[in-house]
Image (cartoon, rainbow, N blue to C red):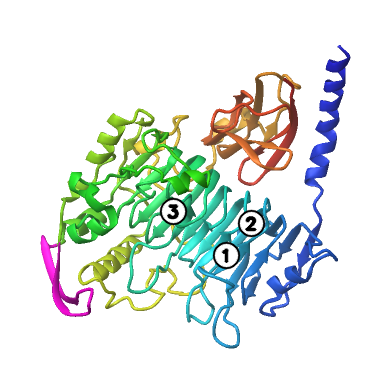
Amino acid sequence: MNTLIRNTVSAFLLAFLLPTVAMAQSEMMITWTGVPGEFETTIRADTLADGSQAHDVYVLEKGKVYFMLESLDINDSVVIKGQEFGDGETPATVQALPKPDGAYGTTQWPGSFFEVYGDAATFRLENLLLNGALADESNSVFSTLTARGDDQIIETDNVVFANFDWNMQSFGNDTSFDINDTVGKDYPSYLNGIFFGGFLWGGGGWMGSFKDIEITNSSIMNCWCNAIVISTHAEQALVDHVSFVNIVAGAFFHRGTNNLTVRNSLFYNSMMWRHSKRWDAILWSDDIAQGPIGVMNLASQVPADSATIANGRGYDHLSRNITWHNNAWANDQVVRDNWDSYPETWSWEGTDADGNPVTLADTTMYTADEISVWVGALGQSLMAADPTITEYDNVETTDDLALEDAYTEQMLDRIWDFRDNENHDRYTDWWWKYEADGEKVTVEWPMAEDLSYSMSSPAATASTSGGPVGDPRWSGASGVDTEEESVLPEAVALHQNYPNPFNPTTEISFTLADRSAVRLTVYNVLGQVVRTLTNEVMLPGTHSFTWDGKNSFGSAVPSGVYMYSLSTGNQVITKKMTLIK
């Protein structure tokens, strides 16, 4: 009895003390002066005697562009965020600018805005527009951030990445990524090449390893390679309510993605390259002979070698634990017409491995109808052999995305410019991309891209809750009918969970005044995401969800204090709860 009382008292003390410690962060405003390099030099100089950062949070002014001259090394847990901004305002922006010698100052390949070195560090970006285009139009910074240490956590919330080949990648060990409300767009890709660059890369191979990945409420558009590369595996990965639009080589790397759940997401023109005999043999090896890969993008996986297993990165290629459910997909008519316009064969003059002149050729392999499948023949055979690969409740939707056709047409044209002779003859600089305002190195705000679709399409009711799939910003909150307003609640309210303390389950309820894009998330006292209970566009009224004390991947969490947070787009409310076992 005394032990029970003591544990209960300890739990309640934790409920009041631990969140206070976790949330006690010191902020520093980096006042904008217009001097290039002030952003990174201010943070670099803000250190204590032991070399650690003097502040935890660095705040940038909304409506200002901070020109960055060189990479910023991150060695401690740091938050970089912009001030909150509203309609008619622009976010705090960080943009690349060359140094006086004409080059951007990156520290090592591939060259990033942020190089995260500190082991066990948490690095968070929030309320920012990050623009990799050098302001003098000379070049583009390759990457937004690179995780290089061990056991790091990378978080983004309300961030836009533009004009980078890569957004985020791990070259360290056991990196976790928690990505929410984030957009990756305007991927330039390297000149005279193909299939390189994307939103998130790592998970083995020649890159670092992944631990936990959670990508929610986000959009990846106009991407030149795979949007997400999990080269072999992550310990656990969740992609929920993400819009993948105009992806050249497939939303995911075909051989990896072990321990992955993909749900409530939209795949629109997600394999724009189209299969051809010569290049697909390079890209897909012998798998392509079994038929088009399909939107679900599965291929066989080689067994882990002894070195991989010795490094703690082993995986079972016959028990891959991949699930796709409640997603929607389509290829629009612009893409299908382009595919059908390809010649059956074509040739060009090139050189062999020794530099000798030679005639090269390629062949179109499949029709537009054959390519437009959810799971290809190889994927079907893999699912039959491995019961841990499953898919259900995925639907083909209508090709009615609101995105202006010029974005898609320009990407298709550049694909053919490479494909016809394995060289870019017409697109010869970094600024090949279509921009609605014609500006090359600035990012139009609000974003000109529109990834919304008809609310009468199959995608509008395909999610796990019967609502729309994809990034909620595109199907987002709209007004309610005037005759209903008198009976609707007047404010958003998050209620205390019941029971509290609890074991093993508790109910969390909230009330909405309007139709809203809602995210209900459970965090631990370190601010790490434990479980996302819902990511949906929801109607006005009271809604209730049960948390069973498990994380996003079904594992029970330990006793302790947890925070649950309700985000409705323009409001965030957080409360505490205690789990006792």
* Residues under numbered marks 2 and 1 in contact, where contact means CB atoms less than 8 Å apart: yes
User: Is residue 149 or residue 180 the one in the foreground?
Assistant: 149
Q: Residue at x 56, y 31 (%)?
A: 484
Mark 2 or mark 3: whose residue is earlier in sequence: 2
Name the kind of residue labelled 2 in the image: Leu
Identify the residue position indicated by label 2 in the image.
125
Q: Residue furthest top?
A: 1
Residue 167 point in image, percent of width and height: 51, 60
Return the x and y of residue 261 as percentages of the image width and height: 45, 37
Which residue position holds label 1? 130
Tell me which amino acid carries mark 3: Gly
Residue 339 seen:
yes
Q: Residues within 10 Å of mark 1 (few under 14, many from 20)?
A: many
- Residues in magenta, as a range: 343-362
Q: Nearer the viewer, mark 1 or mark 3?
A: 3
Q: Which mark is residue 205?
A: 3
Magenta run includes residue 358: yes
Q: Is residue 346 above or below residue 512?
A: below
Q: Nearer the viewer, residue 510 or 169?
A: 169
Residues marked 1 and 3 touching at CB (< 8 Å)? no
Q: Helix or strand or loop: what does disc 2 sit on?
A: strand
In this rendering, which labeled residue sits more in front, label 2 or label 3?
3
Q: Please, what is the three-letter code of the amino acid marked with disc 1?
A: Leu
